[in-house]
Each structure stands twice: as structure tokens, then as C-alpha cells.
Image: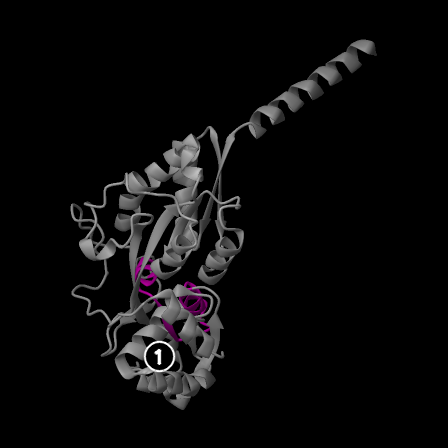
Amino acid sequence: MKKFLTILITIALFATLLCGCGSNKEKVIIYTSVEDYVVEDLDACLKEKFPNYDITIEYMSTGNHAAKLLAEKTDTECDIIYDLEYAYLAQLDSEGILADLSAYSTDIYYDDLVENKNYLPHLRSGGAIILNTDLLKEKNLSEPTSYEDLLKPEYKGLISMPNPKSSGTGYMFLKSLVNSWGEKEAFEYFDKLTPNVLQYTSSGSGPVNALLQSEAAIGLGMTAQTVIKINEGAPLKVVYFEEGSPFTIYGQAMIKGKEEKDAVKEVFDYMVNEFGYRYNEKFGPEKLFKDKSYALENFPKDIKYSDMKNNSIEEKERLLALWKY
């Protein structure tokens, strides 16, 4: 009996030792607003590259991502910011939250993507009108060719768009129409469009997901995400209206003070110098790197981009205060 108890105690002590060893791993926490399929890929790559680190990727919508960091400032568990649009990164930087990244070369990026020494580009993200061609045929509906077409009563409840207050993708559609038509006409348009909208989703990937589930026939969504689904066999189609493709630039950064931790810096170095190219090749082939040009099957060529000038955080906050849906 004593021998049996001794064995049990030995096993328990060994298990405790193992748990203790696991908890001693250096932790790295990443806040992100990137799509779930990218989170899965990044997580797998980081686990393979850094098996001795405990790396956690926490997803949150763009608006919540920025708000959380603005509230926490440098007293945050977050070490690395990944996939946050430039307007928010500029706001965080103005609050002294971001680490100095001037040691990183920006020569690899196109000049129009480099804005600040404290954050680096990771994505030029364009939007498009996405169609579920099977559902349109099933309902005997024609394909829309303009924003005006989306107001037709036959599309009632069949349109999905991200909410600009919680999604950078949603905001870029709003901003592109404000710049193209003027503020008054753009907001009047959304007053008319809203009765046809099934849902203003909280994330930029929401409309494409609604299309894939045949909950909506038309989505205002992300080009790259849609092309990935098309290449997987989904009955989706990318179209652009006269106003062009709205776009925004997303970046990556470290929280001030966290760059002094070896684990955080090593992970960030990998994300900038290796995973960045992987992402551009696999998920978002819009022009980012001067020395690399990637082509994704079925990705549109010669895209006409919308006018996205005056994309400051002050302008964004002013416009979002007028959004009521």
C-alpha cells in the first residue's frame, strides 16, 4: 500500500513539475482584427517557429481593438498590434502608445504605404461589390451595376454591409462615397439603402460569410477574402461600380516598452520579415512590396481605386458620429 502511495505521489509531483515548466514559457500577446483564416495560418506559423514561447492571438473588431488600446495605453497585456488601420494607429501613436520602429527598413514597401516611423504596413486592402450568383439566379434577379441599383425594392433584405462604426471595411465604403458624392448625398444614400440591408455586420468578413450561407445575395466586402472563397469553389463574383474600389491600409506595431522583451521582438521581426511576404502571397496580393509581386488566381487586375483622401482619425470620428444604423 505504501509503495502504491509512493508511486501516486511521484506521478503527481512529476505532473506538477511539467505544468510548472509549461507556465515558465515567455508569453507574447497579439491583438488583431485580421480575418479568422489568417489568424489560423499565423497561429500555426508562430507555433512552428517559436515552440518555446506561449503566443496568444486575440481577435477583436477594428473599433473595439483601437478602443481597448486607447483605454489601456501602455499598461496593456498586448505586446504586438497586427492588422489595425492607419487612422487608428496614428491615433495610438499620438497618445505615445507605440514603440519606435525606426530601426526597421521601410525601403521594401511602396512609398505611398509608409506614413510613420512607429508603425509598418502589412496590407493594402481593397473592397468590392460581391455577388452570390447562384442566389441571384434562384430569385430571378439581375446583377446590379451601380450603387443606385442596390436601392431597388427587389433587393430588400438581400444586402449585407459591415457597420462603419465597428469595421474598417465598412468605414472605407462610407468614406469613398462621401469623397465621391459629397457628405450630404452619401448619408442620404445610406438612409435609402438601409431598408434593403439584411444586416450591418460587426466585422468586415461578415458580408462574405452571409453570401456563403446564402443569407444575402449582395455584399459590400473585401476583394481578397472573396477571391479566396471563389478559388475554393464558392459561387461568388467580384464587381466594381463607377466609383471604384474603396481601400484602406492596415499596419502592425509594438506597444511602447514591449520591444525591450526579446520574445516580443523576435516574434515581431518574424511577422515583418517573413510572415508579411507569406500573407501578401497567400491572402492579399494587392501591391505592398517593391521587390515582390504576387498573383492570386481570379484576383482582379488593373483595379480602379476610389478617392480615399482626408482619411484622418478626426474625419473618421466626425463621420461616424453621423452614422445612425
Which corner quadrant of the image does residue 135 belong to?
bottom left
The magenta stretch is 204-229
Which corner quadrant of the image does residue 234 belong to?
bottom left
Coloring basis for residues? one colour
Name which residue type carries label 1: Lys
Q: Residue at x 76, y 12 (%)?
A: 6
Image coordinates of residue 148 in percent, x first then y, are 31, 86
Q: Residue at x 48, y 75 (%)?
A: 199
Q: Residues within 10 Å of mark 1 (few under 14, many from 20)?
A: few
The answer to whether 175 appears left or right of 40 in the picture is left
Q: Residue at x 24, y 72 (%)?
A: 307
The answer to whether 109 appears left or right of 77 in the picture is left
Q: Is residue 78 visible?
A: yes
Please, what secondary structure does the residue beneath circle 1 have?
A: helix
Up-down relation of residue 90 to residue 270 (above or below): below
Q: Residue at x 45, y 64 (%)?
A: 203
Q: Is residue 131 visible?
A: no
Name the residue carrying label 1: 137
Which corner quadrant of the image does residue 214 belong to?
bottom left
